[in-house]
Amino acid sequence: MIEELVRSQFPFFESGLRSAISEVGTFKEFEQDQELIREDQYIRAFPIVLSGLIKVCRTDEAGNELLLYYMRPGEVCTVSLICCMDRTRSRVKAIAEEPTTVVLIPVELLDSWMTQFQTWKEYVMRSMQRRFDELLNALDSIAFLKMDERLERFFRDRYRSSGSKIYEGSHQDVALALNSSREVISRLLKQMEKKGMISLYRGRIDYSPLCDKSY
């Protein structure tokens, strides 16, 4: 089954690389809200997403989260790759936003695959460039955008990442993702609802209008 999933997600990989992933990779399923990577843990295997959606974030001492980026099918967590290269502890945590399947690759293969498979090297470099751009966007959002603008970007980014127009979660969940307070987020969400930008339900936010490019 892994071989079929790898072939469908990575048709650009060399056949030898796809075979290697199928042979050494471990297929694993995660439920929604289940943690894949913990902060301060040593990473012995890094995940490549086959299906689902994973959020990667940082937390402070008070438990507040800062969303860094999402991992979609066909993507790898580059922060975990860097930790693997340096043999350091993870500085982020990764949590399944929805039921997710991944293939776990032993860290000791990272270096050898970089020299053995050209398509793996290109894949890792492209992934790092993409994550670097996303981290810059996250930094720009914090530094230059007001909270209401950050909130709009949060939903639009989630739509681009998952294709979903519904957020299954509470106002507190959104506040944690944006490192804000529930009171502030609830007030801004109600303002957005009055403007017709979203619809609020118990434990669910419909942000379909924000996905309309003409909005």
Image (spheres, grey):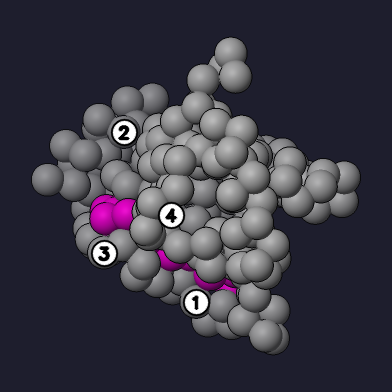
Amino acid carrying label 1: it is Arg
Mark in the foreground, 1 or 3: 3
Residue matched to label 2:
9
Residue matched to label 4:
54
Could you tell which of marks 3 and 2 lies nearer the N-terminus? 2
Say above or below: 91 vs 202.
Answer: below
What is the crowding at mark 2: few (fewer than 14 residues within 10 Å), some, or many (at least 20)? some
Left or right position of 118 against 48? right
Q: Residue furthest front?
A: 194
100 or 155, nearer to the observer? 155
* Residue 130 at x, y percent in the picture: 63, 37
**Secondary structure beneath label 3:** loop
Residue matched to label 1:
38
* Residue 196 at x, y percent in the picture: 55, 31
Residue matched to label 3:
31
76 or 167, nearer to the observer? 167
Left or right position of 208 against 146? left
Q: How far separated are the C-alphas under marks 1 and 4?
A: 13 Å
Could you tell which of marks 1 and 3 lies nearer the N-terminus? 3
* Residue 17 at x, y percent in the picture: 34, 40
Where does the magenta region start and end? 90-103
Q: For residue 111: magenta?
A: no
Are the residues at dot 3 and dot 4 in contact (C-beta closer than 8 Å)? no
Mark in the foreground, 3 or 2: 3
Q: How far separated are the C-alphas under marks 1 and 3?
A: 16 Å
